[in-house]
Image (cartoon, rainbow, N blue to C red):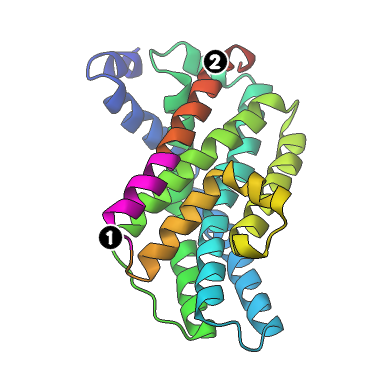
Amino acid sequence: MRLEGTLRAPGTLSAFWVLLGMQLARARRSWRQYIIVSSAMPSGIAILLRAMTSHPGEALALQIISGNVVLSVAITAIAMLAQQVAWMRQNRTFDYYHTLPVPNFAVILAILVAYLLFALPGIAVVLTVGALFYGVHLVISPGILPAILGTGVALSGIGALLGIASRDGELAGLTGNLVMMAVLFLGIIPSGRLPLPLVALSDILPSTYGVRLLLHLLTGQASPYVWLVDGLMLLFFSVVLFFAVERLSYRVG
């Protein structure tokens, strides 16, 4: 009752902070594993691609680094979130949240932000490894954080929908990993090197716009126009996907 009163009085924003605190408390024993998972795979892929290409060139190097940063976000926003949502639905954990005056998307966002907080050290590792192994200069600006958050929110809608649609956490993990790999390959490979059907597919993935925005940020060329176009696309995907999550909320619980 005390928690419910806290949620009712200040509104949705305060409710979100309470939900976020609950998710951070849940993850206090496994945060080390989250950091390892979000950094090991993207860093390993970046190193592997560097070992396979003798002279990748600066443009391709930056594309690979940006793609692996988004992969680190996708691991949390798609694979881990899908598995967590499926597990919560399977164990009827959402029944508890339905007793609180908060929308489903606030619960999803709280889970996502908790995961992203643990993914930030892994993203820093990816950027460091990429700069060292590819020998490129990266411009680290404050705009990277909202770009990562915007990409994570857009991708988390996909993760939440996979979790809702899957019958259990195991299936959600498998489908989440498949989608995550699509995000990886379509994010790392420049669109000019993709066949036309895959170019069309990349245009409907939020990760494409997240990679492009990060690419401009890391080169110091993120103009207001880039923020407007890619930022609005990420916002569009976020709204559409979370509207779908809210509409399908009857399947949660």
Q: Which mark is residue 142?
A: 1
Residue 20, percent from left and from top: 39, 35
Q: Secondary structure at mark 1?
A: loop
* Residue 231 is one of the magenta-drawn residues: yes
Q: Which mark is residue 114?
A: none
Prevalent SS, magenta region: helix
Residue 35, percent from left and from top: 52, 59
- Residues at marks 1 and 2, CA–CA distance in whole angstroms: 34 Å
Tell me which amino acid carries mark 1.
Answer: Pro
Q: Earlier in the sequence, mark 1 or mark 2?
A: 1
Closer to us: 198 or 126: 198
| Residue appearing at x 66%, y 76% in the figure | 49
Closer to us: 57 or 162: 57
Closer to us: 114 or 217: 217
Which residue range is magenta in the image?
A: 222-234
Tell me which amino acid carries mark 2.
Answer: Arg
| Residue appearing at x 50%, y 72% in the figure | 62
Rendered-image quadrant of the C terminus: top right
* Total numbered labels: 2
Does 237 sit above or below residue 203? above
Q: Which residue is mark 2?
A: 247
Does 62 sit above or below residue 185? below
Task: Decide: few, some or many residues near mark 1? Use Cα within 10 Å; few <14, some 14-19, many ≥20.
Answer: few
